[in-house]
Image (cartoon, grey):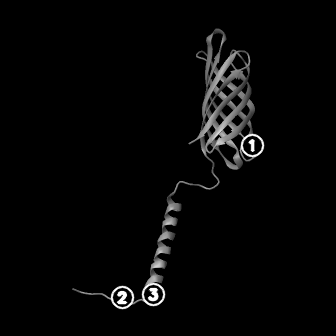
Amino acid sequence: MITVIYFTPIPCRTLKAQTMKKTVFILILLITAFSNARSQEGCTYLLLKAGPVYESAWTGTVGVDLNTKYHNSAELSFSYYKADQKSYDNLLVGMFYKPVLARSRNTTFKFRLGSHIGTDNSDFILAALGGIEFLQSLAPGFDLIISNTSGYYFWARNHWRVSAEFGFRISL
């Protein structure tokens, strides 16, 4: 049996402490190198909201809210519009840019600017839209939404629409 004796100028306790420090440093380096966290990028939210539209109609929206720099966001949404009269409905896809107007710790007030495209099962519909949005954080990753959207819908039966939607958004 061969016995190997190591002679180090560094005492054993110091060697173990240095090895431990190196191991911890390498672990931290690997975790940060391969993690999915990115600085200065926001969260993605799933939003659900519904509400009345002026002149006896209702709308419901399901969408994704993508945060950008400085708490601004972009929204991609799918909306369903149902008028009480004559069973008229629309299926719409929308894109909105939402810059922040005012922000405090748990409250955000945004301007909404965007468009919808879609159909009413007989004609193509295009809309130019604007509005406001109020967000109140109720818990981490859960916000209350109160929004107003107004706009002109080309080739639709009800051209001018003003809606008030209430809902929530959940962090993904």
Amino acid type, residue under disc 1 in the picture: Val
x and y percent of residue 40 in the render?
A: 65, 54
* In the image: residue 57, left or right of residue 25: right
Mark 1 to mark 2 CA distance (whole Å): 65 Å
Q: Are marks 1 and 2 in contact (CB under 8 Å)?
A: no
Residue at 66%, 46% in the rendered image: 68
* In the image: residue 44, left or right of residue 128: left
Residue designated by label 1: 100
Residue designated by label 3: 11
x and y percent of residue 130 in the render?
A: 74, 31
Amino acid type, residue under disc 2 in the picture: Tyr
Asked if 49 appears above or below 100 in the picture, the reply is: above
Which comes sooner in the sequence, label 1 or label 2? 2
* In the image: residue 121, left or right of residue 97: left
Residue designated by label 2: 6
Q: Nearer the viewer, residue 160 or 50?
A: 50
